[in-house]
Amino acid sequence: DLAVKRLTAAILVGCPSALLYSRRAQVLLQSGRPRAAIRDCTAALDINPDSAKAFKARARARARLKHWAEAHADFQEGLRIDYDDATYEESQVVAEKMKGIQAVAAERRAKEDEAERQRRLSQAKARHEAVIREHREAEERREAEAREKRLAEARFAGEPIFKDAKRQGFMFDFMGVKRGPCKCAKCDVYVWRPVRISG
């Protein structure tokens, strides 16, 4: 605590260096305050982006918090700027953790991709089945209409009044109203409409 207080007093004097922040970060990390150490290292890197000491201290603090991906990145950057064997050994432990995390993430992504593929397949299958069902229903409707028309034709074909109506193109109903064939051209055999007779 005394070391932290003295370093803090030195920082408060003004114009603190990246090295000063990095030293306080190391002391904070040793006293079990990794989050405060990360803040100091970030402040040091704001002053000097090439401070290997700050990268290494922040990597150790992040490893303490089990933030493996960020710790790995900081270790790699610190080693790139200033390589040393001790830090390399620490970084290998974090790299192993990262491999495990990446394997789990890759497996999770593969499962999510497979679930998404299955969902799309089921949607495509449902759309295909809906189209087939619509076609089948339309065909059944057409067949029902054709069957109804054939039945009506068979019912009326033998009647003399119907034969005369087909020959003349009109007929008189039971009330004496003149009727012509339906305009739809589908039911001209058995549906008749009133015809206006000019005076």
Image: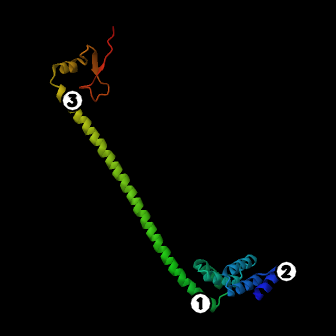
- Residue position for label 3: 152
Quarter placement of the N terminus:
bottom right
Q: Which residue is denoted by mark 1 in the rendering?
A: 89
**Residue at the left extreme?**
158
The disc label shown at residue 169, or none? none
Q: Name the residue under label 2.
A: 13
Q: Which of 168 and 24 is in front in this view?
A: 24
In terms of sequence position, does the residue under pointer 3 or pointer 2 come before the other?
2
Whether residue 24 is situated above or below residue 145 in the rendered picture? below
Residue most toward the right?
13
Spatial CA distance of label 3 from label 2 is: 107 Å
Q: Which of 109 and 168 is in front in this view?
A: 109
Amino acid type of the residue that numbered disc 3 sits on in the rendered structure? Ala
Residue sitting at 65 percent across and 88 percent down? 83
Marks 1 & 3, CB-CB < 8 Å contact: no
Coloration mode: rainbow
Task: Kindly identify the amino acid type of the residue bearing the numbered disc 1.
Answer: Glu
Dividing the picture into quarters, in which one does residue 170 lie? Answer: top left
Please indicate, yes or no, whether residue 143 appears anywhere in the rendered image: yes
Q: Evaluate if marks 2 and 1 touch, with contact meaning CB atoms under 8 Å apart.
A: no
Q: What element carries label 2?
A: helix
Q: Is residue 63 above or below residue 189?
A: below
| Picture coordinates of residue 77, whole percent (x, y) | 64, 81
Callout 1: SS: helix
Query: Farthest residue in the top direction?
Result: 199
Q: Where is residue 76 in the image (x, y as percent from the top left)?
A: 62, 82
Going by the numbered disc 2, the residue's amino acid type is Val
How far apart are the two marked residues, 1 and 3, measured between alpha carbons? 94 Å
Q: Residue 198 in the image: state x and y as whole percent.
A: 33, 10
Image quadrant occupied by the C terminus: top left
Q: Earlier in the sequence, mark 2 or mark 1?
A: 2
